Image (cartoon, helix red, strand yellow):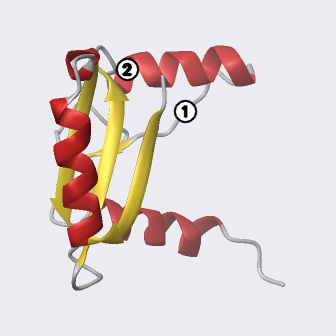
C-alpha cells in the first residue's frame, strides 16, 4: 500500500483537493491536503487507500523486498525503533540522508 504525494502551488493543490474529494468514489481513499512549512505558497496533496496503515505498508514492503529487519522512526515511545519527536517528516528525511548518504 503506497500513496501518491504531490507538491505544487497551494492554489493548484487546494483546487485538486476540492475536485478529488467531490468525486463519487472519494470514500475509497484517504485524501489529505496541507500547507508546506518549508516552501511558502506551496502545499502537499496525499492520496492513500482508505485502509492504508503504517503497519500494513511496512509488512507489504517486507514481502516485496524480502527484507525482514526494519528500523522505524516515529513520535510514540515504545512503538518505533527511533524517536523523532519535535521534527517534521521532511527533517526525518534530511536526517536519513545525512546519516546514510554515501559521499562521492
Q: Residue at x 29, y 82 (%)?
A: 39
Q: Residue at x 45, y 63 (%)?
A: 93
Query: Which residue is identified by label 1?
Result: 70
Provide residue 46's location: percent of width, then percent of height: 32, 45
| Front-most of residues 47 and 94 | 47
Q: Quadrant of the C terminus?
A: bottom right
Q: Is residue 47 left or right of residue 69?
A: left
Which is more N-terminal, label 1 or label 2? 2
Q: Name the mark nearer the viewer: 2 or 1.
A: 2
Q: Residue at x 16, y 39 (%)?
A: 76
Residue 83 appears in view: no
Q: Residues within 10 Å of mark 2 (few under 14, many from 20)?
A: few
Label 2 SS: helix
Residue 72 appears in view: yes
Label 1 SS: loop
78 to 25, vertically: above or below: below
82 to 35, vertically: above or below: above
Provide residue 21's location: percent of width, then percent of height: 18, 34
- What is the quadrant of residue 86 in the picture? bottom left
What is the C-alpha distance between the residues marked 2 and 1?
A: 12 Å
Q: Residues within 10 Å of mark 1 (few under 14, many from 20)?
A: few
Provide residue 29's location: percent of width, then percent of height: 28, 23
Query: Which residue is identified by label 2?
Result: 55
| Front-most of residues 86 and 77 | 86
Amino acid at each position: 500500500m503506497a500513496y501518491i504525494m504531490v507538491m505544487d502551488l497551494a492554489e493548484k493543490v487546494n483546487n485538486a483537493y476540492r475536485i478529488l474529494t467531490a468525486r463519487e468514489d472519494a470514500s475509497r481513499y484517504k485524501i489529505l491536503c496541507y500547507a508546506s512549512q518549508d516552501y511558502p505558497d506551496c502545499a502537499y496533496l496525499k492520496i492513500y487507500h482508505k485502509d492504508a496503515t503504517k503497519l500494513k505498508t511496512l509488512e507489504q514492503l517486507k514481502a516485496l523486498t524480502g527484507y525482514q529487519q526494519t528500523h522505524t522512526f516515529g513520535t510514540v515511545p515504545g512503538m518505533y525503533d527511533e524517536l523523532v519527536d519535535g521534527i517534521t517528516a521532511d527533517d526525518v528525511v534530511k536526517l536519513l540522508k545525512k546519516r546514510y548518504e554515501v559521499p562521492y
